[in-house]
Amino acid sequence: MKTIFSGIQPSGIMTLGNYLGAMKHFVPLQDQFNCFYCIVDQHAITVPQEPAVLRENIRRLAALYLSVGLDPNKMTLFVQSEVPAHAKLGWIMLCTSYLGELERMTQFKDKSDGRGESIPGGLLAYPPLMAADILLYGTDFVPVGEDQKQHLELTRDLAARFNNRYGDIFTIPEVRLPETGARIMSLAEGTKKMSKSDPNQGAFISMLDDADTITKKIKRAQTDSDSVVRYDKAEKPAVSNLMTIYSLCSGKTLDEIEAMYEGKGYGAFKTELAEVVVETLRPIQERFEQLFHSSELDDILTAGAEKANKVANEMLYKVEKAMGMARI
Ligand code: TYM
Protein backbone atom coordinates (compact mmCIF):
# COMPACT_ATOMS: atom_id res chain seq x y z
CA MET A 1 0.00 0.00 0.00
CA LYS A 2 1.34 3.46 -0.91
CA THR A 3 2.07 5.94 1.87
CA ILE A 4 0.79 9.49 2.37
CA PHE A 5 2.27 12.09 4.70
CA SER A 6 1.13 15.62 5.39
CA GLY A 7 1.55 18.17 8.16
CA ILE A 8 -0.05 21.35 9.43
CA GLN A 9 1.46 23.93 11.76
CA PRO A 10 -0.34 24.61 15.06
CA SER A 11 0.39 28.30 14.71
CA GLY A 12 -3.11 29.74 14.91
CA ILE A 13 -6.62 28.55 14.17
CA MET A 14 -6.94 26.71 10.88
CA THR A 15 -8.49 28.73 8.08
CA LEU A 16 -10.94 27.80 5.38
CA GLY A 17 -7.85 27.83 3.12
CA ASN A 18 -6.21 25.08 5.19
CA TYR A 19 -9.45 23.11 5.05
CA LEU A 20 -10.22 23.45 1.35
CA GLY A 21 -6.57 23.26 0.21
CA ALA A 22 -5.43 20.41 2.44
CA MET A 23 -7.51 18.86 5.25
CA LYS A 24 -10.63 18.14 3.19
CA HIS A 25 -8.52 16.05 0.80
CA PHE A 26 -6.92 14.06 3.62
CA VAL A 27 -10.20 12.35 4.44
CA PRO A 28 -10.84 10.17 1.34
CA LEU A 29 -7.13 9.27 1.19
CA GLN A 30 -7.35 7.36 4.48
CA ASP A 31 -9.40 4.64 2.75
CA GLN A 32 -6.83 3.97 0.03
CA PHE A 33 -3.44 4.69 1.54
CA ASN A 34 -1.30 4.27 4.63
CA CYS A 35 -1.70 7.83 5.93
CA PHE A 36 0.39 9.76 8.45
CA TYR A 37 -0.94 13.17 9.47
CA CYS A 38 1.20 15.34 11.67
CA ILE A 39 0.89 18.37 13.93
CA VAL A 40 4.19 20.03 13.13
CA ASP A 41 4.89 21.92 16.36
CA GLN A 42 8.64 22.04 15.67
CA HIS A 43 7.90 23.98 12.50
CA ALA A 44 5.68 26.36 14.47
CA ILE A 45 8.55 27.31 16.81
CA THR A 46 10.64 28.65 13.92
CA VAL A 47 8.99 31.91 14.96
CA PRO A 48 8.39 32.81 18.64
CA GLN A 49 5.34 31.15 20.25
CA GLU A 50 3.65 31.79 23.59
CA PRO A 51 3.85 28.43 25.50
CA ALA A 52 0.23 28.38 26.71
CA VAL A 53 -1.05 29.38 23.28
CA LEU A 54 1.06 26.79 21.48
CA ARG A 55 -0.14 24.06 23.86
CA GLU A 56 -3.75 24.99 23.17
CA ASN A 57 -3.18 25.24 19.41
CA ILE A 58 -1.63 21.77 19.27
CA ARG A 59 -4.69 20.31 20.97
CA ARG A 60 -7.03 22.34 18.82
CA LEU A 61 -5.40 21.18 15.63
CA ALA A 62 -5.50 17.56 16.80
CA ALA A 63 -9.24 17.88 17.49
CA LEU A 64 -9.80 19.58 14.13
CA TYR A 65 -7.99 16.85 12.22
CA LEU A 66 -10.41 14.34 13.72
CA SER A 67 -13.43 16.62 13.36
CA VAL A 68 -13.09 16.84 9.59
CA GLY A 69 -13.55 13.07 9.41
CA LEU A 70 -10.16 11.46 9.92
CA ASP A 71 -10.54 8.14 11.70
CA PRO A 72 -7.85 6.94 14.14
CA ASN A 73 -8.57 3.37 13.05
CA LYS A 74 -7.66 4.22 9.48
CA MET A 75 -4.76 6.68 9.75
CA THR A 76 -2.00 7.75 12.14
CA LEU A 77 -2.28 11.18 13.80
CA PHE A 78 0.63 12.43 15.90
CA VAL A 79 2.59 15.40 17.22
CA GLN A 80 5.97 15.94 15.57
CA SER A 81 7.91 16.71 18.79
CA GLU A 82 6.75 13.38 20.26
CA VAL A 83 8.72 11.57 17.56
CA PRO A 84 12.39 12.55 18.08
CA ALA A 85 13.49 11.00 14.77
CA HIS A 86 12.09 14.10 13.01
CA ALA A 87 14.59 16.45 14.65
CA LYS A 88 17.41 13.95 14.13
CA LEU A 89 16.75 13.44 10.44
CA GLY A 90 16.04 17.17 10.15
CA TRP A 91 19.64 17.83 11.18
CA ILE A 92 20.92 15.31 8.64
CA MET A 93 18.79 16.92 5.92
CA LEU A 94 20.12 20.35 6.91
CA CYS A 95 23.63 18.97 6.45
CA THR A 96 22.53 17.65 3.03
CA SER A 97 21.31 21.13 1.96
CA TYR A 98 23.13 24.07 0.42
CA LEU A 99 22.74 27.54 1.86
CA GLY A 100 21.90 28.94 -1.59
CA GLU A 101 18.93 26.65 -2.15
CA LEU A 102 17.55 27.35 1.35
CA GLU A 103 17.84 31.10 0.83
CA ARG A 104 15.94 30.78 -2.45
CA MET A 105 12.79 29.39 -0.77
CA THR A 106 10.03 31.97 -1.26
CA GLN A 107 8.50 31.23 2.16
CA PHE A 108 11.90 31.92 3.77
CA LYS A 109 12.16 35.18 1.84
CA ASP A 110 8.61 36.24 2.82
CA LYS A 111 8.95 35.34 6.49
CA SER A 112 12.41 36.85 6.92
CA ASP A 113 11.50 40.04 5.12
CA GLY A 114 11.88 43.10 7.36
CA ARG A 115 13.59 41.22 10.22
CA GLY A 116 17.02 42.68 9.46
CA GLU A 117 19.80 40.84 11.31
CA SER A 118 17.33 38.99 13.54
CA ILE A 119 16.11 36.31 11.14
CA PRO A 120 15.56 33.15 13.22
CA GLY A 121 17.89 30.37 12.05
CA GLY A 122 14.93 28.01 12.23
CA LEU A 123 13.29 29.74 9.28
CA LEU A 124 16.20 28.70 7.09
CA ALA A 125 16.28 25.16 8.52
CA TYR A 126 12.50 24.80 8.11
CA PRO A 127 12.44 23.02 4.69
CA PRO A 128 15.08 20.38 5.63
CA LEU A 129 12.95 19.51 8.69
CA MET A 130 9.93 19.24 6.40
CA ALA A 131 11.95 16.93 4.12
CA ALA A 132 12.75 14.79 7.17
CA ASP A 133 9.04 14.58 8.10
CA ILE A 134 8.21 13.23 4.69
CA LEU A 135 11.21 10.96 4.08
CA LEU A 136 11.01 9.17 7.44
CA TYR A 137 7.85 7.35 6.39
CA GLY A 138 8.87 6.23 2.89
CA THR A 139 6.19 8.61 1.65
CA ASP A 140 4.92 8.27 -1.93
CA PHE A 141 2.50 11.23 -2.04
CA VAL A 142 2.24 14.51 -0.13
CA PRO A 143 -1.15 16.26 -0.34
CA VAL A 144 -0.63 20.00 0.24
CA GLY A 145 -1.72 23.40 -1.04
CA GLU A 146 0.23 25.19 -3.74
CA ASP A 147 2.35 27.25 -1.31
CA GLN A 148 4.21 24.07 -0.30
CA LYS A 149 5.16 23.02 -3.83
CA GLN A 150 8.63 24.55 -3.69
CA HIS A 151 9.37 22.81 -0.37
CA LEU A 152 8.36 19.53 -1.98
CA GLU A 153 10.73 20.10 -4.87
CA LEU A 154 13.54 20.69 -2.39
CA THR A 155 12.56 17.51 -0.53
CA ARG A 156 12.88 15.53 -3.76
CA ASP A 157 16.29 17.10 -4.47
CA LEU A 158 17.57 16.33 -0.97
CA ALA A 159 16.30 12.73 -1.13
CA ALA A 160 17.96 12.18 -4.51
CA ARG A 161 21.21 13.81 -3.34
CA PHE A 162 21.28 11.59 -0.25
CA ASN A 163 20.47 8.43 -2.24
CA ASN A 164 23.23 9.24 -4.73
CA ARG A 165 25.76 9.43 -1.98
CA TYR A 166 24.64 6.67 0.40
CA GLY A 167 22.52 4.22 -1.60
CA ASP A 168 18.85 3.78 -2.33
CA ILE A 169 17.37 4.65 1.07
CA PHE A 170 14.64 7.22 0.50
CA THR A 171 11.51 7.00 -1.63
CA ILE A 172 11.30 10.13 -3.81
CA PRO A 173 7.90 11.64 -2.88
CA GLU A 174 5.43 13.30 -5.25
CA VAL A 175 3.35 16.36 -4.49
CA ARG A 176 -0.45 16.06 -4.74
CA LEU A 177 -2.19 19.37 -5.31
CA PRO A 178 -5.99 19.62 -5.36
CA GLU A 179 -7.47 20.42 -8.79
CA THR A 180 -9.36 23.38 -7.36
CA GLY A 181 -8.66 25.20 -4.12
CA ALA A 182 -4.88 24.69 -4.11
CA ARG A 183 -4.62 28.39 -3.33
CA ILE A 184 -7.57 29.98 -1.53
CA MET A 185 -7.09 33.73 -1.50
CA SER A 186 -7.54 36.38 1.18
CA LEU A 187 -11.04 37.86 1.51
CA ALA A 188 -9.49 41.33 1.73
CA GLU A 189 -7.20 41.02 -1.29
CA GLY A 190 -7.98 38.57 -4.07
CA THR A 191 -4.36 38.33 -5.15
CA LYS A 192 -2.90 37.37 -1.75
CA LYS A 193 -3.05 33.92 -0.11
CA MET A 194 -5.53 33.38 2.75
CA SER A 195 -3.31 32.93 5.78
CA LYS A 196 -3.95 32.25 9.47
CA SER A 197 -1.17 34.69 10.37
CA ASP A 198 -2.78 37.61 8.52
CA PRO A 199 -3.08 40.49 11.03
CA ASN A 200 -6.39 41.47 9.39
CA GLN A 201 -8.97 39.11 10.95
CA GLY A 202 -11.40 39.94 8.16
CA ALA A 203 -9.02 38.49 5.55
CA PHE A 204 -9.63 34.88 6.55
CA ILE A 205 -12.39 32.61 7.80
CA SER A 206 -11.30 30.47 10.70
CA MET A 207 -12.66 26.92 10.85
CA LEU A 208 -14.05 27.80 14.29
CA ASP A 209 -15.71 31.12 13.40
CA ASP A 210 -19.39 31.26 14.36
CA ALA A 211 -22.16 31.82 11.80
CA ASP A 212 -22.41 35.56 12.48
CA THR A 213 -18.72 36.17 12.07
CA ILE A 214 -18.59 34.14 8.86
CA THR A 215 -21.54 36.07 7.42
CA LYS A 216 -20.00 39.42 8.33
CA LYS A 217 -16.62 38.50 6.86
CA ILE A 218 -18.18 37.32 3.61
CA LYS A 219 -20.41 40.40 3.34
CA ARG A 220 -17.31 42.60 3.70
CA ALA A 221 -15.18 40.51 1.34
CA GLN A 222 -13.59 42.31 -1.58
CA THR A 223 -15.40 42.11 -4.92
CA ASP A 224 -15.18 44.50 -7.87
CA SER A 225 -17.29 47.19 -9.47
CA ASP A 226 -19.03 45.30 -12.29
CA SER A 227 -21.48 43.24 -10.15
CA VAL A 228 -21.29 40.16 -12.37
CA VAL A 229 -20.75 36.73 -10.80
CA ARG A 230 -18.33 35.35 -13.36
CA TYR A 231 -15.18 33.26 -13.00
CA ASP A 232 -12.18 35.11 -14.39
CA LYS A 233 -9.05 34.70 -12.30
CA ALA A 234 -7.04 37.36 -14.14
CA GLU A 235 -9.68 40.10 -14.36
CA LYS A 236 -11.84 39.25 -11.33
CA PRO A 237 -9.56 37.52 -8.78
CA ALA A 238 -11.63 38.34 -5.67
CA VAL A 239 -14.97 37.19 -7.13
CA SER A 240 -13.31 34.11 -8.67
CA ASN A 241 -11.94 33.20 -5.25
CA LEU A 242 -15.40 33.49 -3.64
CA MET A 243 -16.79 31.32 -6.44
CA THR A 244 -14.09 28.70 -5.82
CA ILE A 245 -15.03 28.63 -2.13
CA TYR A 246 -18.72 28.34 -3.07
CA SER A 247 -17.99 25.50 -5.46
CA LEU A 248 -15.85 23.51 -3.01
CA CYS A 249 -18.32 23.92 -0.15
CA SER A 250 -21.47 23.17 -2.17
CA GLY A 251 -20.26 20.69 -4.79
CA LYS A 252 -21.71 22.91 -7.54
CA THR A 253 -19.57 23.65 -10.61
CA LEU A 254 -18.40 27.18 -11.44
CA ASP A 255 -20.71 27.18 -14.49
CA GLU A 256 -23.70 26.25 -12.32
CA ILE A 257 -22.87 29.06 -9.89
CA GLU A 258 -22.51 31.57 -12.73
CA ALA A 259 -25.94 30.53 -14.08
CA MET A 260 -27.57 30.69 -10.62
CA TYR A 261 -26.57 34.32 -10.08
CA GLU A 262 -26.97 35.67 -13.58
CA GLY A 263 -28.40 39.18 -13.33
CA LYS A 264 -28.58 39.02 -9.50
CA GLY A 265 -25.44 40.91 -8.43
CA TYR A 266 -23.18 40.24 -5.46
CA GLY A 267 -25.70 40.69 -2.60
CA ALA A 268 -27.63 37.45 -3.14
CA PHE A 269 -24.45 35.60 -4.05
CA LYS A 270 -22.73 36.60 -0.82
CA THR A 271 -25.75 35.79 1.37
CA GLU A 272 -25.95 32.28 -0.03
CA LEU A 273 -22.18 31.80 -0.01
CA ALA A 274 -22.20 32.59 3.72
CA GLU A 275 -24.94 29.95 4.26
CA VAL A 276 -22.98 27.34 2.32
CA VAL A 277 -19.78 28.01 4.29
CA VAL A 278 -21.63 27.96 7.64
CA GLU A 279 -23.25 24.62 6.73
CA THR A 280 -19.87 23.18 5.69
CA LEU A 281 -18.21 24.12 8.96
CA ARG A 282 -21.16 23.39 11.29
CA PRO A 283 -20.72 19.59 11.60
CA ILE A 284 -16.95 20.01 11.97
CA GLN A 285 -17.45 22.53 14.78
CA GLU A 286 -19.94 20.26 16.55
CA ARG A 287 -17.51 17.33 16.55
CA PHE A 288 -14.73 19.67 17.60
CA GLU A 289 -16.63 20.70 20.74
CA GLN A 290 -16.99 17.06 21.78
CA LEU A 291 -13.38 16.14 21.09
CA PHE A 292 -11.40 19.11 22.33
CA HIS A 293 -11.71 18.34 26.05
CA SER A 294 -11.97 14.56 25.74
CA SER A 295 -9.39 12.11 27.06
CA GLU A 296 -10.03 10.16 23.88
CA LEU A 297 -8.00 12.82 22.08
CA ASP A 298 -4.97 12.13 24.30
CA ASP A 299 -5.32 8.38 23.77
CA ILE A 300 -5.38 8.87 19.99
CA LEU A 301 -2.25 11.06 20.04
CA THR A 302 -0.42 8.63 22.34
CA ALA A 303 -1.21 5.69 20.08
CA GLY A 304 -0.31 7.78 17.01
CA ALA A 305 3.10 8.74 18.43
CA GLU A 306 3.82 5.10 19.28
CA LYS A 307 3.09 3.94 15.74
CA ALA A 308 4.97 6.86 14.15
CA ASN A 309 8.02 6.32 16.40
CA LYS A 310 8.21 2.71 15.32
CA VAL A 311 8.16 3.48 11.59
CA ALA A 312 10.38 6.57 11.86
CA ASN A 313 13.04 4.89 14.01
CA GLU A 314 13.44 2.10 11.48
CA MET A 315 14.15 4.62 8.73
CA LEU A 316 16.45 6.70 10.93
CA TYR A 317 18.48 3.59 11.76
CA LYS A 318 18.90 2.80 8.05
CA VAL A 319 20.02 6.37 7.38
CA GLU A 320 22.49 6.55 10.25
CA LYS A 321 23.90 3.15 9.39
CA ALA A 322 24.42 4.15 5.75
CA MET A 323 26.22 7.30 6.90
CA GLY A 324 28.50 5.45 9.31
CA MET A 325 26.91 6.70 12.50
CA ALA A 326 25.29 3.58 13.96
CA ARG A 327 27.83 1.34 15.68
CA ILE A 328 25.97 -1.88 14.83
P1 TYM B 1 0.63 25.24 6.85
O1 TYM B 1 0.46 24.90 8.27
O2 TYM B 1 0.95 26.65 6.50
O3 TYM B 1 -0.66 24.84 6.03
C1 TYM B 1 -1.21 23.55 6.13
C2 TYM B 1 -1.76 23.11 4.78
O4 TYM B 1 -2.75 24.03 4.31
C3 TYM B 1 -2.41 24.47 3.00
N1 TYM B 1 -2.84 25.87 2.86
C4 TYM B 1 -3.61 26.33 1.87
N2 TYM B 1 -4.18 25.72 0.82
C5 TYM B 1 -4.92 26.46 -0.02
N3 TYM B 1 -5.13 27.79 0.15
C6 TYM B 1 -4.58 28.46 1.19
N4 TYM B 1 -4.79 29.74 1.36
C7 TYM B 1 -3.78 27.71 2.11
N5 TYM B 1 -3.10 28.04 3.25
C8 TYM B 1 -2.53 26.91 3.69
C9 TYM B 1 -0.89 24.33 2.93
O5 TYM B 1 -0.43 24.26 1.60
C10 TYM B 1 -0.67 23.05 3.69
O6 TYM B 1 -0.91 21.92 2.87
N6 TYM B 1 5.23 23.57 5.80
C11 TYM B 1 3.85 23.18 6.00
C12 TYM B 1 3.68 22.15 7.10
C13 TYM B 1 4.51 20.91 6.95
C14 TYM B 1 4.30 19.86 6.03
C15 TYM B 1 5.28 18.88 6.32
C16 TYM B 1 3.37 19.66 4.99
C17 TYM B 1 5.57 20.57 7.73
N7 TYM B 1 6.03 19.34 7.35
C18 TYM B 1 5.37 17.71 5.57
C19 TYM B 1 3.46 18.47 4.25
C20 TYM B 1 4.45 17.52 4.54
C21 TYM B 1 3.03 24.41 6.36
O7 TYM B 1 3.54 25.37 6.85
O8 TYM B 1 1.70 24.27 6.18
Image: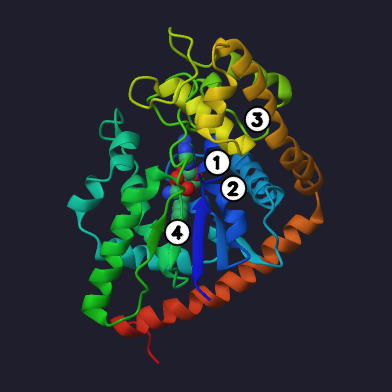
Look at the numbered disc 2 and give the secondary structure of its residue. Answer: helix
> Coloured how?
rainbow
Q: Quadrant of residue 310?
A: bottom right
Question: Which residue lies under the disc numbered 4?
Answer: 142
Q: Residue at x 43, y 11 (%)?
A: 224
Q: Amino acid at mark 2?
A: Lys
Q: Are marks 1 and 2 in contact (CB under 8 Å)?
A: yes
Front residue of this view, candidates 88 and 30: 30
Label annotation for residue 277: 3
Label whose residue precedes the other's in the sequence (3 or 4):
4
For mark 1, give the secondary structure: helix
Lateral position of residue 230 relative to residue 151, left or right? right
Q: Badge 3: few (under 14), some or many (20 or more) residues near its Cα, within 10 Å?
A: many
Residue marked by disc 1: 20
Q: Is residue 119 above or below residue 212?
A: below
Left or right placement of residue 317 versus residue 207 in this view = left
Whether ligand 1 has any atom under 8 Å from the Cβ at mark 4 is answered as yes
Tell me how far mark 1 sits from mark 3, CA to CA: 11 Å
- Please tell me which residue is depicted at 50% across the width and 43% down the height of the picture: 21
Q: Residue furthest top?
A: 225
Query: Distance of mark 1 from mark 2, alpha carbons?
Result: 6 Å
Disc on the earlier residue, 1 or 4: 1
> Mark 3 or mark 4: which is in front?
3
Query: Residue 44: x percent and y percent?
Result: 49, 46
- Give the mark, 1 or 3, whose residue is nearer the N terminus: 1
Q: Give the alpha-carbon distance from disc 1 to disc 4, as whole Å.
A: 15 Å
Q: Residue at label 2?
A: 24
The tag earlier along the polypeptide, 2 or 4, is 2
Left/right placement of residue 48 relative to residue 99 reads right
